[in-house]
Image: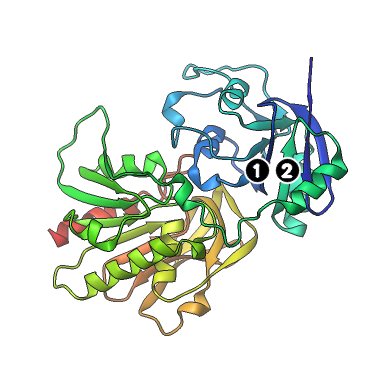
């Protein structure tokens, strides 16, 4: 027996479909992702906390789920919306179905939604508050609930996904540890840690409440600031820690490299004295073109963000702009003019997405080699 599910938006629109996940009700900002594959990585990316994700690709779930594609121990999305959830799982790596996965982790999923119409509405009206439910099927009631729910602006969600205690990341395969990387965990994806580990790094992960002194006293060869959810300007503790680390680096002869991805890019931009702003509907997908200013090369990138650093806010600072999004011209990369500090807004570790940009990890290794 099928059970109905409804997605309702604060703008008054609602979309009725069929439940294929948990029997529950959940709130979040409605966003869309244009990736054709990688739904498990999207579901388990901590950066999606507080968001209901609509997949624009119409057929989702056909290759099932497996332990290897988890970007964190559990899903973080508030809800999942698709055009058609596959009833058949066909892949040699599959250990279960997407539907069972959503039920197990209490994620509300609705299929049978006109995702083209929904995506068009988000692009025109912008990302907005929403509710997804299989328990309350009254559209008027749900619209009112959406209006009263909490949005993302002003919310520090990093503290909800960051680790509670420092720990060392490890894998079954051993590596020859040549460098020590201190990771500020704002909601870090597993594959980022893997990229460092596979390059011979000892990866020491710190919670977002850590101070600059906590990190300095671990004697790292480099510091990395991870991706994460929520409004970056609200993460005042991380911003202050990054600010102090920059001051420390500028005051010592040994230049400690720093690298930021996604929210880490925001943290560096804010620490340099800049500001962030909310995009109308964000960038989420695995095929976004970005131009490298220094070489003129265009890279196809994986992206997941709803905020950007304002270039104007960094005018007069010791910062250079390195990458720009070719869809809308937004700033997607920066570096300090004299210190070994750089960041990108997109995801060079992919998962899901192309591997064009993994050279940025190699760049960090080179900087740490000079710092040893």
Quarter in which the N terminus is drawn: top right
Residue 5 appears in view = yes
At x 73%, y 38%, the residue is 132
Q: How many marks?
A: 2
Colour scheme shown: rainbow
Above or below for 257 versus 357? below
Question: Would residue 101 be found to the left or right of residue 130 on screen?
Answer: left
Q: Residues within 10 Å of mark 2 (few under 14, many from 20)?
A: many
Above or below for 141 versus 270? above
Pick the front one: 339 or 327: 339
Question: Would residue 8 be found to the left or right of residue 89 on screen?
Answer: right
- Label 1 to label 2: alpha-carbon separation: 8 Å
Residue 239, percent from left and from top:
40, 65
At x 46%, y 57%, the residue is 263
Residue 66, percent from left and from top:
47, 23
User: Is label 1 in contact with label 2 (beta carbons under 8 Å)?
Assistant: no
Mark on residue 131?
2
Name the secondary structure under disc 2. Answer: strand
Question: Would residue 6 be found to the left or right of residue 31 on screen?
Answer: right
Residue 136, percent from left and from top:
80, 34
Pick the front one: 86 or 27: 27
Question: Would residue 52 be found to the left or right of residue 215 on screen?
Answer: right
Residue where numbered disc 1 is placed: 52
Name the secondary structure under disc 1. Answer: strand
Q: Residues within 10 Å of mark 1 (few under 14, many from 20)?
A: many
Residue 293 appears in view = no
At x 37%, y 67%, the residue is 240
């Amino acid at each position: 027996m099928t059970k109905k599910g409804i997605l309702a938006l604060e703008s008054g629109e609602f979309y009725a479909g069929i439940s294929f996940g948990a029997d529950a009700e959940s709130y979040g900002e409605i966003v869309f992702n244009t990736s054709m594959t990688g739904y498990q990585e999207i579901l388990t990316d901590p950066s999606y906390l507080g968001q209901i994700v609509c997949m624009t690709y119409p057929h989702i779930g056909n290759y099932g789920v497996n332990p290897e594609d988890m970007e964190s121990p559990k899903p973080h999305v508030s809800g999942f919306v698709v055009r058609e959830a596959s009833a058949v799982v066909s892949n040699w790596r599959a250990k279960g179905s997407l539907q069972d996965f959503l039920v197990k982790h209490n994620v509300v999923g609705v299929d049978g939604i006109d995702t083209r119409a929904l995506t068009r509405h988000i692009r025109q009206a912008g990302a907005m508050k929403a509710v997804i439910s299989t328990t309350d099927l009254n559209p008027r009631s749900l619209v009112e609930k959406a209006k009263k729910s909490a949005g993302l602006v002003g919310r520090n969600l990093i503290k909800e996904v960051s680790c509670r205690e420092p720990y060392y990341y490890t894998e079954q395969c051993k590596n020859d540890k040549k460098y020590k990387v201190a990771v500020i965990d704002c909601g870090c994806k597993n594959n980022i840690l893997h990229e460092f580990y596979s390059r011979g790094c000892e990866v020491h992960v710190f919670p977002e409440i850590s101070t600059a002194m906590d990190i300095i006293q671990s004697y790292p060869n480099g510091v990395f600031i991870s991706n994460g959810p929520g409004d970056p300007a609200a993460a005042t503790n991380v911003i202050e820690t990054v600010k102090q680390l920059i001051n420390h680096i500028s005051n010592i002869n040994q230049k400690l490299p720093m690298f930021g991805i996604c929210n880490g890019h925001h943290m560096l931009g804010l620490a340099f004295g800049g500001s962030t702003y909310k995009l109308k509907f964000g960038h989420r997908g695995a095929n976004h073109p970005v131009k490298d200013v220094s070489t003129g090369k265009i890279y196809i990138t994986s992206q997941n963000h709803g905020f950007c650093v304002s270039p104007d806010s960094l005018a007069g600072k010791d910062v250079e702009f390195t990458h720009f999004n070719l869809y809308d011209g937004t700033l997607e990369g920066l570096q300090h003019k004299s210190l070994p500090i750089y960041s990108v807004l997109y995801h060079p570790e992919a998962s899901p997405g192309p591997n064009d940009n993994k050279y940025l990890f190699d760049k960090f290794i080179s900087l740490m080699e000079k710092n040893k």
